[in-house]
Amino acid sequence: MGDNAPSIPRGGAASRLDLDYREAAWHRLESEPFDVVVIGGGVTGAGAALDAATRGLSVALVEARDFASGTSSRSSKLFHGGLRYLEQLEFGLVREALRERELMTSYLAPHLVKPLPFLYPLTHRAWERPYVASGLALYDTMGGASSVPGQKHLTRAAALRMFPSLRRDALVGAVRYYDAQADDARHTLTVVRTAARYGAVVRASTQAVGFAHESDRVVGVRVRDAEDGRETTVDAGVVLNCTGIWTDEIQALSGGRGRFKVRASKGVHIVVPREKITGDTGLILRTETSVLFVIPWKNHWLIGTTDTEWTHDLAHPAATRSDIDYLLERLNAVLVSPLTPDDIEGVYAGLRPLLAGESEETSKLSREHDVARVVPGLISIAGGKYTTYRVMAADAVDAGAEDLPKLVPPSCTDKVPLLGADGYFAMRNQVDALAAEYGLHPYRVLSVLDRYGSMIRDVLEPGLTAAALLSTVPTAPDYLLAEIRYAVTHEGALHLEDVLTRRTRISIEYPHRGVGSAAAVADLMAGILGWDAAARAREIDRYTARVEAERASQTTGDDAAADAVRTAVPEVRAHLADLGSPAVAR
Ligand SMILES: Cc1cc2nc3c(=O)[nH]c(=O)nc-3n(C[C@H](O)[C@H](O)[C@H](O)COP(=O)(O)OP(=O)(O)OC[C@H]3O[C@@H](n4cnc5c(N)ncnc54)[C@H](O)[C@@H]3O)c2cc1C
C-alpha cells in the first residue's frame, strides 16, 4: 500500500463503517493476504468473521448487497430452542439453541436479545397438558442454567386474562413458557461491527464473482464492488462460503460440486398494530404442518410463518395474496375480533437455507447445519438456525483451520460480548440521567438503548450541537433522525433501502412502508454520502418502486406471478454481477 493509501483505524474506531473505512477496506483487500476470507454478511458469515478474528487470524468479510440483506433480516426474530424441533426429536439442536439463547440474553448481547413469554394454548383435554408439560420440562432444563422463568400452567380463565383476544372456544387451558427475541438485522450488523472492532476487514456491496486457483486449490476470491464495478482478487489462506441460500451458486463458481445442496423454503410474516390484538404474551399455535407464531414486536405484532418451497429469485422473495390469506385465516380461527387485509402494516418474506434431504416437504427438512470442504481451500457451511450462528461460525472456522499452515486456537466467542453489551445494564439504570442530558423522554432513551446498547452516546451526541437530529423521523416517530445519521456514519448504510428496511424497520412498521419518510431520510443521507440531486432522486424512485412492486406482488395468486412483479424493479446496487443462481435456472 502506498503512503497515501487510506488506512483503517485501530481499536473502537475500526467499527465506524463510513465511506473512508469503505475505501480503506478496498485497499486492504487489494494489497494484503488474509488467513480467512468470508463470503456472505448474514449472521453466519458475520459470526465466522468474528470467530476467526478473535482467534488471532487476519480476516476479510465480503457481502454482495447489504449486511443482513438475505435471510438474516427476514426471520421470526426469535432466539429459541424450538419446541417444534423437540417434537421432531432433534434434541442436540434444541439443547445447543437453548444454551445460545441464555448466553445471548445474559452476557453476549443483552441489549439486543430479550426474554419473551409465550402462551401455548391447549386444545385437547386430558392427554395434551402432560404431553406439553414434559416437553417444556426438557425445554426448561436441557440448555443448562437459565435466567428466564420456567413453564407455568394456566386454566382457561387465567389464560384468557393473559390473552383476552383469544376466543374462549380456542383453548381448554394453556401453558406459559419463555423464549427470546431480537431485531435480527440489527443483531447481525452488530456482529459485523464487533468483528471489525477485532480487526476483520468488513465490506458490504462487495460481491464474490470468482475464485483464484493454484493447481486444484482455492487461493483467493475475485471480488467486485457492486457500487462502481471495480474488481480485485483477495488472497486467502482459506475461504469460508457462508452464503445461505446462495451456497450452491458459490460452490458452482468454484468449480467444485459441494457435498450438500441447499433448498430455499419461503416464510412470510405480516405485521399488524399492537392494538388490534390484546394480549400480554406471544402465542404459539399449531398448524397442520408446522406452527404459527404471534409475536409482540414493539407496538406491533409479527405473525408468521408459512413454509413452502421457493424456486425463483433468491434475493427478493415475494409474498403472495395466498400467503397472506393463509396467515390471516389461521390467526382469525383463534381471535375474538378477526383481522382483515386492511389491518396489515407490513409484510416480509424470507428464505430458509435448508439442507436438501429426502423429504419433499420443506417443513420436515432438518434445521441442523453441515460443514464441508468443497475443494481444498474452500469450506461451505449451511443450514442451521439464526439462534445457533455462533456454533456454526466456530465449526466453519475449525474446518477452515485445517487448511491453514499454522496452529489456530479454539473459538472464544462465548467470552466476547458484542459491541454495546459492555456497560449496558449500568446504562439502563442511568436512563433518567441520560434522558436529562439529551433532553429526551426516558422511554425514548430506553428504546434507543435497546438498539445500540452502551454505544448510545455515539448515536445521540451529534444531537447536542445539531438539535434537529434529536427530533423524530417524519412519519416514522419511533425513530430519531440521529439514528439515520448514525446508520450512515457508523453502520455502513449506503442506500435508502439499507436504512428503511434494516438499520430501522420503518419498511414493515408503518403502513406507508417507508415511502412517507423517504424524502427526509434521503436528505439527511445525501449530505453525508455526497449524493447530488440526481442520486437523491434515484434513491427515492428505486425505493418507491420496490415498495409498489412488493404491494403488487402481494395481490398475486402464485409465486411465479409474484416473482415476475417483484423482480421487474432494478437493483439499487448497479454493478451486481448475475452469477446465474441455480434456483432460478431450475
Ligand atoms: C421466515 C423465516 C423465519 C425464521 N425464523 C427464525 C427464528 O425465529 N429463529 C432462528 O433461530 N432462525 C430462524 N430462521 C432461520 C435463520 O433466519 C437463518 O438460518 C439465518 O438467518 C441464515 O443466515 P445466513 O447468514 O446463513 O444466511 P443469509 O442471512 O442469507 O446470508 C447470506 C449472505 O450471503 C450474501 N451473498 C450471497 N452471494 C454472495 C456473493 N457472491 N458474494 C458476497 N456475498 C454473497 C447474501 O447477500 C447474504 O447477505 C428463519 C428463517 C426464515 C426464512
Image (cartoon, grey):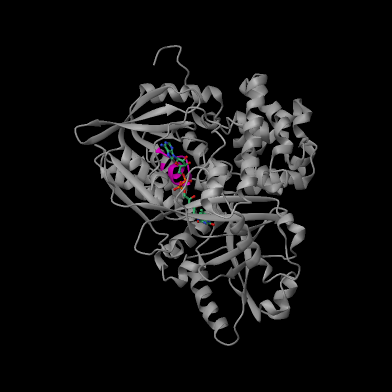
Residue 233 sits above or below residue 157 on the image: above
Most extreme residue toward the top is 3
Instruction: Tell me: 390 left or right of 321.
Output: left
Report if residue 505 lies within the magenta region. no
Q: Which residue is located at x 73 percent, y 47 percent?
A: 511
Residue 497 sits above or below residue 372 on the image: above
Most extreme residue toward the bottom is 126
Report x, y in % for residue 417.
51, 46
Picture quadrant where residue 18 is located: top right
Principal secondary structure, stretch drawn in magenta: helix
Report x, y in % for residue 12.
53, 32
Instruction: Tell me: 353 left or right of 158.
Output: left
| 264 or 445, nearer to the observer | 264
Instruction: Tell me: 451 left or right of 406.
Output: right
Inspect this view and state whether residue 108 appears.
no
The number of callouts visible is 0
Q: Which residue is located at x 37 percent, y 42 percent?
A: 249
Report if residue 43 lies within the magenta region. yes
| 566 or 446, nearer to the observer | 566
Residue 115 sits above or below residue 36 on the image: below
Q: Which residue is located at x 56 percent, y 51 percent?
A: 349
Q: Which residue is located at x 77 percent, y 40 percent?
A: 475
Picture quadrant where residue 286 is located: bottom right
Report x, y in % for residue 156.
69, 80
| 332 or 368, nearer to the observer | 332
Check the picture and name the quadrant holding the N terminus.
top left
| 543 or 84, nearer to the observer | 543
Inspect this view and state whether residue 152 appears.
yes
Segment tinted magenta in the rendering: 39-48
Report x, y in % for residue 533.
67, 20
